[in-house]
Amino acid sequence: MTQEQSVSKFIIIANHLCLDFINTQIIQGGQLVELLEDFTDLVGWLAAVQLLDAAQAEEAISRWNNTGDGQHVFERALTFRATLRDIAKQIVAGQPVSPAVVEDINKLLRYRIHYSELISGHEGFTTRSYAEFDEAIHLLTPIAEAASELLCSADFSLIKKCENPECILYFYDTSKNHKRRWCSMSICGNRMKVAAYYRRHRPTPEDN
């Protein structure tokens, strides 16, 4: 079953954090709609995809909203999203990912601060990773890490753009037979099926 949920105003349908971040721009009524309008929206998205817990999100808003650092990170998030969209476009088109966009990911990865703890349980040992957000720019590093994971581990043939030509959403196809065509049945799939049915059954001039 395709994971499909809407958290607040965000559309979480891509099955991958990197692609869900790209999908914070959508088309509605033929117009481009920006879902990340300010720093609080950025923090809201990070919380929606569970990259920040409630306490971390509240602290981020308290420390950096309406500050120069917060505005800088918000603007950097938008430019980084454009970089990630370029990556998705290149992959879907079967083109090599350009070195420039790889370097853009690496620039953010260099800010990553995290540590792991060893956890002892009834079934053995596991590790748990923790991220630290001491500076506003650190908020973007989990997105860069998701982009790195996508490039290193994903099957590129399963990174797809919605087949609705008026849609700009991307997704990672984890369906059983890898036949997924739409960002979402409720958003585009049903609409396109109805349009196709109408084209097949509309009267021809000879019928009149």
Image: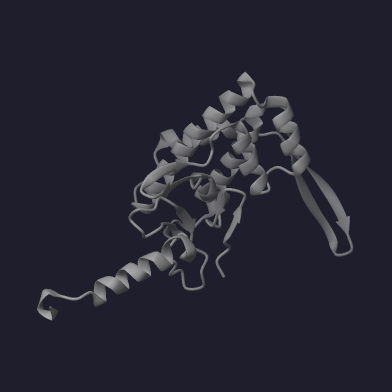
In this figure, which colouring scheme has been used for the structure? Answer: one colour
**How far from the left and from the top, in percent, is residue 44?**
64, 41
**How far from the left and from the top, in percent, is residue 123?**
85, 65
Residue at 47% from the left image edge and 73% from the top image edge: 177
Left or right: 47 with respect to 10?
Answer: right
- Establish if 65 lies above or below 53: above
Left or right: 161 with respect to 5?
Answer: left
**Foreground residue among 197 and 49:** 197
- Establish if 79 lies above or below 116: above
Left or right: 45 with respect to 196?
Answer: right
- Establish if 185 lies above or below 84: below
**Foreground residue among 168 and 16:** 168
Q: Is residue 42 visible?
A: yes
* Figure disc tally: 0
Q: Quadrant of the N terminus?
A: bottom right
Residue at 57% from the left image edge and 39% from the top image edge: 144
**Foreground residue among 159 and 170:** 170
Q: Is residue 181 visible?
A: no
Q: Residue furthest front?
A: 208
**How far from the left and from the top, in percent, is residue 91?**
40, 50
Residue at 39% from the left image edge and 53% from the top image edge: 167
Q: Quadrant of the C terminus?
A: bottom left
**How far from the left and from the top, in percent, is residue 64?**
68, 26
Residue 74: image quadrant is top right
Residue at 54% from the left image edge and 57% from the top image edge: 13
Q: Residue furthest left?
A: 206
